[in-house]
Amino acid sequence: MHLSSILPAAAALLATAPVVAAKGNMGFALGDKTPTGACKSQQDYVDDFKAIESASGATIVRIYAASDCDTAKNILPAAKAQGFQVVLGIWPDTDESYAKDKAAVVTYAPQYASQVYAVTVGSETMYRGNFTGDQLLAKIKDVKSAVPQFKVGTADSWNKFQDGTADPLITGGVDILLCNGFSYWQGQKITNATASFYDDMLQAWGHIQALAGDKIELWVGETGWPSAGSKYQNAVPGTQSAATFYSEAFCGIIDWGYNAFFFEAFDEPWKPLSVGQDGSVADETHWGAMNADRTAKYSLKC
Ligand SMILES: *[C@@H]1O[C@H](CO)[C@@H](O)[C@H](O)[C@H]1NC(C)=O
Ligand SMILES: CC(=O)N[C@H]1CO[C@H](CO)[C@@H](O)[C@@H]1O
């Protein structure tokens, strides 16, 4: 789809929403480890929040596993001190991680209720084939019944919301859905990356809204572009391309009135190499909008 045909589609979607006057909310995905791979302390999160707010103005982050590195315990007091909100994650892939993360949410979220924006159960679990929509819905309902005062949903790749996999969630009463879209991992050139990203999101959100109207709060859960690392098909990392993707795709969708999390706040040099969809080995240490020392790589204001 060309951008010229995307914009009317976006306008149509916007027209069906109540009134989208203001910009959307801007947030960042945040890791739970320091550059050396140690677990972050409460003070590390305070320093992260100061850097994020001063560079971008954002005051919301998402984390992935509430008990891993005692994240919920450490991040929520820091969020309270700095006026931040957090989307807490539960990692449901094993029964053990699910039980531990759920327990951490149940323990700490009510103590810091104003700091908890929502709870996500799973990150790309349908994309990985780990759960069907019905299996994931059962987990989400279990968490919702434990913390009914919070919005509960999941985050997954945009195509799982577009292709019907997530229909049980969409029609099953979840509060919030985060849709991830990476033009980079679709092997797009930077010149087509913004159009490809908008097209992905509109397909996902269009399908969700066709089934659920505006009952579900929608966010971009992750998007971004690495400043360094290995090529992926036609996608080439680089600071200039990362800056272009940030200002055009990420700020663009926020300017339209949609909410979006950028992946991710800071580079994570401790991360091991990972294997991409086509089997190629990828370096995922340079996806930060900021360097590991918390300096911005390019302008982060939208
Ligand atoms: C550019 O992105 C659009 C929208 O996703 C896609 O349909 C098109 O195939 C892409 N162009 C190229 C050359 O890949
Ligand atoms: C419920 C379920 O299928 N969990 C599996 C998800 O994937 C992890 C690792 O890939 C398995 O260990 C779990 O058993």
Image (cartoon, helix red, strand yellow):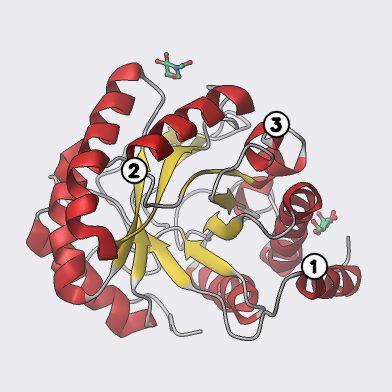
Q: Nearer the viewer, mark 2 or mark 1?
A: 2
Q: Residues within 10 Å of mark 1 (few under 14, many from 20)?
A: some
> Residue 92, labelled with which disc?
none
The picture quadrant for ligand 1 comes to: bottom right
Instruction: Identify which residue is drawn at 53% across, 22% down.
Output: 130
Residue type at mark 3: give it.
Answer: Thr
x and y percentages locating residue 238 in the rendered image: 51, 65
Q: CA distance from mark 2 to mark 1?
A: 31 Å
Q: Residues within 10 Å of mark 2 (few under 14, many from 20)?
A: some
Q: Nearer the viewer, mark 2 or mark 3?
A: 2
Residue under label 1? 13
Residue under label 3? 165
Left or right of residue 176: residue 83: left
> Which is nearer the eye, 157 or 72?
72
x and y percentages locating residue 18 in the rendered image: 71, 74
Q: CA distance from mark 3 to mark 1?
A: 22 Å
Tell me: residue 60, above or below residue 281: below
Residue under label 2? 147
- Mark 3 in CB contact with mark 1 (< 8 angstroms): no
Nearest to N terminus: mark 2 or mark 3? 2
Instruction: Identify which residue is drawn at 73% across, 50% down.
Output: 212
Instruction: Identify which residue is drawn at 58% across, 30% down.
Output: 126
Nearest to N terminus: mark 2 or mark 1? 1
Left or right of residue 232: residue 271: left
Query: Which image quadrant is residue 104 in?
Result: top left
Instruction: Identify which residue is drawn at 62% across, 28% down.
Output: 133
